[in-house]
Amino acid sequence: MTTAKPARAPEVVAATLRRRILSGELAPGDSLPPEAELVSQLGVSRETVRLALRLLAAEGLTRTSQGRAGVRIRHPEPERVARSLVQLLTLTGATWGDLLAFRKMLEPAAAAHVAEHASPAERAAIAEVAERGIAPDGAGYHEFHELVVRASGNPILTTVLAAVEQAVRWAAAEQDITQYDREEAARSHRAIASAITAGDARKAEHRMRQHLEAALQHVEASGLLGAPMIPPSRWRGDNTDLPWR
């Protein structure tokens, strides 16, 4: 039987402050007490406090402001979730086929929910992005899916799929997306948006499923269905396009 290592002082202090943040005692925008006050409150050294604050900053729970505000509480940004997801997708060897199977399980149902429950402003935003089409760099494609998911109002779905979408945005940067493929996807977006605007849940779900089926066929025709989304080779060398290097 192995014995767990005792936590280091900075980790104990970070855990104490983390609990205060996650419990809601400290809200985003609030300032932590000054360093000297934390040293006095917690009975630790100044260096321990500094290391603990670095741990919280690395987790995206705090940020340092200029002036008298000092260290402020914040919520982690979606990019931080996407970063962890990209690393996990690399290490697990998740394929493009895995990605599309995952999306087909969730996004058609999300589109149906949005058709029934989205606000007029959300419907208008979805329709506007769909009408704008998809640019050669993929702009418009990711924004459309992010808007639909956000309009679902489900924080778990929104967080997970937003992170997935950002991972896809990076992983797909080197894929050969033709003008025909972009136009076909844009037509699908407009059909989905039309169903959402009309409040037709059944049609929105059907159109989203068709859209993802078309993406699956494109990936399969490209020979990428069983290929890793983010192969380890993408991290080799001095590639400056890699995220968070």
Image: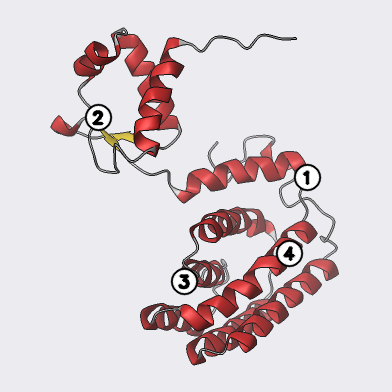
Q: On residue 100, which mark appears?
A: 4
Q: Residue furthest bottom?
A: 198
Count residues near mark 2 (Cα–Cα under 10 Å), then give few for <14, some for 14-19, many for 20+.
some
Q: Nearer the viewer, mark 4 or mark 3?
A: 3
Do the residues under discs 2 and 3 have CB atoms within 8 angstroms?
Answer: no
The C terminus - image quarter: top right
Mark 2 vs mark 1: which is more N-terminal?
2
The residue identified by callout 3 is 151
What is the C-alpha distance between the residues marked 2 and 3? 33 Å
Q: Mark 3 is on which residue type?
A: Ala
> Where's residue 184, x and y in %?
67, 83
Is 38 left or right of 235, judged from the image as shown? left
Identify the residue at horizontal 49%, vertical 48% (top origin): 79
What is the C-alpha distance between the residues marked 1 and 3? 31 Å
Q: Mark 4 is on which residue type?
A: Leu
Do the residues under discs 4 and 3 have CB atoms within 8 angstroms?
Answer: no
Camera sees residue 240: no
Mark 4 vs mark 1: which is more N-terminal?
1
Mark 4 vs mark 2: which is more N-terminal?
2
The residue identified by callout 2 is 32
Depth check, front residue: 130 or 16: 16
The residue identified by callout 1 is 93
Q: Mark 2 is on which residue type?
A: Leu
Q: Mark 1 is on which residue type?
A: Gly
Identify the residue at horizontal 75%, vertical 45% (top origin): 231
Identify the residue at horizontal 62%, vertical 35% (top origin): 238
